[in-house]
Image (spheres, helix red, strand yellow):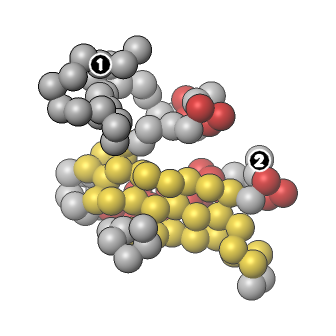
Amino acid sequence: MLTHASLIVTAWDDSRLIGFARTLTDFSYVGYLSDLAVDVAHQRQGIGERLIELTREQMGPRSMLVLLAAPAATAYYPRIGFNPHPSAWILRHDQPLGSPAHP
């Protein structure tokens, strides 16, 4: 997971890791923010937003950032400026290609 990530940004409280952003990106057009995590005790302090800002700085000025939100985080991303996209699609690991979509 870490070895093949294109971009990793972290937040620390002294020697303790408290935040983490992992992105797969081409550093030109698009980056997929596959993981954003902040320790519960450090949430609501702007750490997640800062991790995203640092990620965007590393990706380049014209690169867009996309993600799939965890169910518990669906309200977070619109609050910090992300827009929903009507044409996102997923194919689950156990779903054969060509099978009907799961609701």
Q: Is residue 52 visible?
A: no
Horizontal side of 37 relative to 88 (left or right) equals: right
Residue 51 image point, x, y percent: 56, 60
* Cα–Cα gap, marks 1 and 2: 36 Å
For label 1, the SS is loop
For the point 25% across and 62% down, which residue is it? 27
Q: Is residue 21 above or below residue 31?
A: below
**Picture quadrant of residue 88:** top left
| Label ID, residue 63 | none
For the point 75% across and 78% down, which residue is it? 16
Horizontal side of 64 relative to 39 (left or right) equals: left
In this view, the residue in front, 63 or 102, is: 102
Q: Quarter holding the N terminus?
A: bottom left
Q: Total marks drawn?
A: 2
At label 1, counting other C-alpha atoms closer than 10 Å, the crowd grade (few under 14, some 14-19, many 20 or more) is few
Residue 54 image point, x, y percent: 49, 63
In this view, the residue in front, 2 or 49, is: 2
At label 2, counting other C-alpha atoms closer than 10 Å, the crowd grade (few under 14, some 14-19, many 20 or more) is few
For label 2, the SS is loop
Q: Is residue 3 visible?
A: yes
| Label ID, residue 101 | 1
**Residue at the right extreme?**
41
**Picture quadrant of residue 38:** bottom right
Mark 2, residue position: 44
For the point 40% across and 14% down, which residue is it? 103
For the point 62% across and 36% down, which residue is it? 73
Q: Of discs 1 and 2, which sits in the foreground? A: 1
Horizontal side of 50 relative to 15 (left or right) equals: left
**Residue at the left extreme?**
98
**Residue at the bottom extreme?**
15
Q: Earlier in the sequence, mark 1 or mark 2?
A: 2
Residue 8 image point, x, y percent: 46, 70
